[in-house]
Each structure stands twice: as structure tokens, then as C-alpha cells.
Image: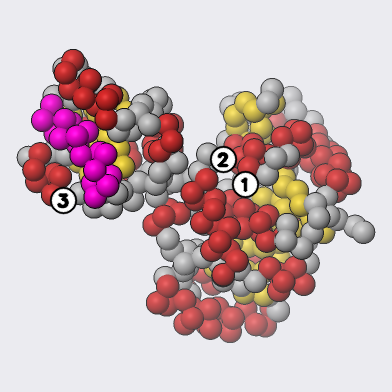
């Protein structure tokens, strides 16, 4: 039996390609014996098991226990200087395509169903002659295009992207609106189906917008800030729904804590740090206080540091001012990592309710 393939593209960045890929991986494994993953072009790379690979490929390899395939899962990475080397002729124009085709051929031998995730928006990879449309076409993989929510903006974005895929003879089969507004979901799906009926595209809804999926975990915040996460390591995958600047009085800050708040506090605010640490192990407050980011140049007093450490509250220490940290985190877009067990479990359970895998599979 030939390996079935699907290419996951998107109309823009942050539409949720990786979330959809995780969902399809989970659903496909309920039907197919062997399901694989590939990220042909990797713009965000890390070292994993001795290989330089895309972060998403490393995450899938770790989560699904296929670490031995990680080099095939991420055959082409775009590291610093790749653009200049390619334009200067130092990289042969045929190399990216040959590398991707060879890796895909090997994965097709091992798997019954292969999920191929594109990189960023449709044009990523153009500099090496391997943007999303070109990769989907050369791998002969039908395309599922993830979009944002809404109606008019989705139609506009899809039309713009379809021209790129049509130019390169890639077959877009499924449009998947994601991050839908729950109370507008049925109305949006009704009109999107009408809009794309003439093109014979399957419009299959994905997730409603979820703060739980959109918000970062404590470990993500630590990685973003480039700092170690101290405290109870068992809480590193806890999701921070609210980011609050602890600028008011200690009592007012504590009274205004929302669910799973990441509290940013200046290192000179001993009373607030002690209060927060003392409340950490009280169930009512533990639900509301996820952890601390302690900013500023002033050293933390010895007794305050002892109370923080003894409480086990997760915290990060950074020399930037609390206001600088606050604005950095407010601009952050959360991504999913292998340690995010809480998010991945939620994605899997939600996918079973919302995503019609049978309908998608029938279009491939």
C-alpha cells in the first residue's frame, strides 16, 4: 500500500499549523498503523540528538517516539547565512529539492501516512526554490491550508495563497479555518462553505479560539527570557493565562490575581515576593498564581530568597526592569514544545471533537 501524504500549509504565520499537524497525527494513528511527520524546510533550528533540525521536527520526534528518524524529518534547515550563500551560488540550486525528495522517499517506505508541515507563510523557502507550494507539488502531496477565523479575511487570504499553489501545480484540497469565535462558528462555516463551493474545496473547521492553547507555559517564558526556571520542576508545563505587573500594594496585587497569573515583580519588593511565596501552597491561591518573574538589578535579600526557595514557587530571575519584561511577554506568541504535555493532551482530546479526519482523508 502506497504511503498517503498530506501537506499542511497556512495563509500566514501563527495560524496554528503545528497544532493542526499534532491533531492529524493523533487522529491518523487511530486509523493507520504507522504515521510519520516531516518538516521539509526548517527555519527555526536546534541541536537534537546530534543533528541540527527544525524545532517542530524535534518536538514531533520526541512526543511520538521516532527520534531515530529526526534527520529525515528535517532534511533542509535555513540557518544564518543560508540566503546569502544560496544567492552567491555557494549552494547548488538543485540541492534543496534533491535533499527533500530523498528524505521523503525514505519516510514513505517506513510509514502508511505522512504529515508534511510547511514553514511559516506560503512564501517561506522561496530563496532556495522550495517554498510551501513548490514543496507540496514536488512531493505530490495534497494540501490542507490552515487559516485564521472569520469570513471575509479568510476568503481574501485563501484567494491570495491559492494563486501561489496553482502557479506551482500544487493541489489544495482542504481549507481549515482555525481559532474560530465559538458563538460565530456555525455562521462562519456556513458562509465559507458557500464561498468555496465552486472550487470544490472541502472547508473543515478546526479549533475555537482557546486561551489555554494560545497562552505560554512557564518553561516557554523561561526560554523566551533566556533564564533558568527555579522552583518546583513538576510545574514547568503549567500554562500562564494572565501576565500581571506587580506595581500596586501587595494586598491589592494579591486580591486582583486572575486564574494562573504570571506575576512580574521588582527584586526590591520583598513584601510582595514573601506574600506570594507564602500563598503558593494554599490551593485557592495556587490556582491563581502560576509563578514569578523577578526583575531588576537590586539583589534579593537573603531572608526573602530563602522564603522563595522553601516555598517551591516557580520563578525566573532577570536583570531587566519589570516593565521591560512585561512588555516583552505581552508581545510573545506561544508555541508548542515537547514538554507541554498539558497542551498536547488538550489538543488531542479537542481534535477528536472538532476535526473530521475521515472527511479530510477521503479528499487525499
Helix, strand or loop for the magenta stretch, by majority: helix
Dot 1: few (<14), some (14–19), or many (≥20) neighbours within 10 Å? many
Dot 3: few (<14), some (14–19), or many (≥20) neighbours within 10 Å? few
Q: Quadrant of residue 310?
A: top left
Mark closest to the chain's N terminus, 3 or 2 = 3
The label on residue 338 is 2
Q: Are marks 2 and 1 in contact (CB under 8 Å)?
A: no
Q: Quadrant of the N terminus?
A: bottom right
| Residue topped by disc 1 | 119
134 shown above or below 152 = above
Report whether 354 appears left or right of 311: right
The label on residue 256 is 3
Secondary structure type for disc 1: loop
Secondary structure type for disc 2: loop
Q: Quadrant of residue 107?
A: top right
191 shown above or below 83 = below
Q: Between marks 3 and 2, how big is the CA–CA gap? A: 32 Å
**Residue 270 in magenta stretch:** yes
Q: Are marks 3 and 2 in contact (CB under 8 Å)?
A: no
Identity of the residue drawn at 72% across and 71% down: 358
Q: Quadrant of the C terminus?
A: bottom right
Report whether 128 appears left or right of 300: right
Q: Is residue 348 visible?
A: yes
Identity of the residue drawn at 43% across and 63% down: 209
Amino acid at each position: 500500500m502506497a504511503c498517503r501524504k498530506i501537506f499542511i500549509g497556512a495563509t500566514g504565520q501563527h495560524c496554528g499549523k503545528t497544532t493542526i499537524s499534532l491533531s492529524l497525527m493523533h487522529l491518523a494513528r487511530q486509523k493507520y498503523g504507522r504515521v510519520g511527520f516531516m518538516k521539509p524546510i526548517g527555519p527555526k533550528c536546534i541541536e537534537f540528538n546530534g543533528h541540527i533540525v527544525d524545532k517542530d521536527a524535534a518536538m514531533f520526534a520526541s512526543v511520538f517516539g521516532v527520534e531515530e528518524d529526526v534527520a529525515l524529518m528535517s532534511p533542509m534547515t535555513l540557518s544564518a547565512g543560508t540566503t546569502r550563500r544560496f544567492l552567491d551560488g555557494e549552494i547548488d540550486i538543485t540541492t534543496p529539492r534533491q535533499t527533500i525528495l530523498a528524505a521523503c522517499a525514505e519516510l514513505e517506505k517506513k510509514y502508511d501516512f505522512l504529515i508534511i508541515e510547511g514553514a511559516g507563510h506560503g512564501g517561506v523557502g522561496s530563496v532556495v526554490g522550495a517554498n510551501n507550494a513548490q514543496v507540496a507539488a514536488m512531493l505530490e502531496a495534497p494540501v490542507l491550508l490552515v487559516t485564521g477565523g472569520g469570513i471575509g479575511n479568510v476568503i481574501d487570504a485563501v484567494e491570495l495563497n491559492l494563486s501561489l499553489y496553482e502557479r506551482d501545480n500544487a493541489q489544495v484540497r482542504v481549507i481549515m479555518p482555525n481559532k474560530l469565535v465559538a458563538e460565530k462558528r456555525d455562521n462562519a462555516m456556513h458562509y465559507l462553505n458557500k464561498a468555496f463551493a465552486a472550487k470544490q474545496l472541502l472547508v473543515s473547521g478546526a479549533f475555537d479560539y482557546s486561551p489555554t492553547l494560545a497562552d505560554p507555559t512557564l518553561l516557554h517564558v523561561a526560554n523566551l527570557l533566556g533564564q533558568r526556571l527555579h522552583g518546583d520542576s513538576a510545574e514547568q508545563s503549567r500554562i500562564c493565562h494572565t501576565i500581571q505587573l506587580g506595581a500596586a500594594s501587595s494586598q491589592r496585587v494579591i486580591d486582583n490575581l486572575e486564574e494562573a497569573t504570571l506575576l512580574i515583580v521588582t527584586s526590591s519588593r520583598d513584601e510582595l515576593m514573601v506574600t506570594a511565596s507564602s500563598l503558593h501552597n494554599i490551593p485557592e491561591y495556587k490556582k491563581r498564581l502560576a509563578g514569578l518573574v523577578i526583575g531588576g538589578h537590586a539583589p534579593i535579600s537573603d531572608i526573602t530568597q530563602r522564603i522563595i526557595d522553601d516555598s517551591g514557587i516557580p520563578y525566573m530571575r532577570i536583570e531587566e526592569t519589570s516593565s521591560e519584561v512585561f512588555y516583552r511577554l505581552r508581545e510573545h506568541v506561544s508555541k508548542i514544545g515537547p514538554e507541554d504535555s498539558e497542551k498536547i493532551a488538550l489538543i488531542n482530546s479537542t481534535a477528536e471533537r472538532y476535526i473530521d479526519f475521515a472527511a479530510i482523508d477521503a479528499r487525499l
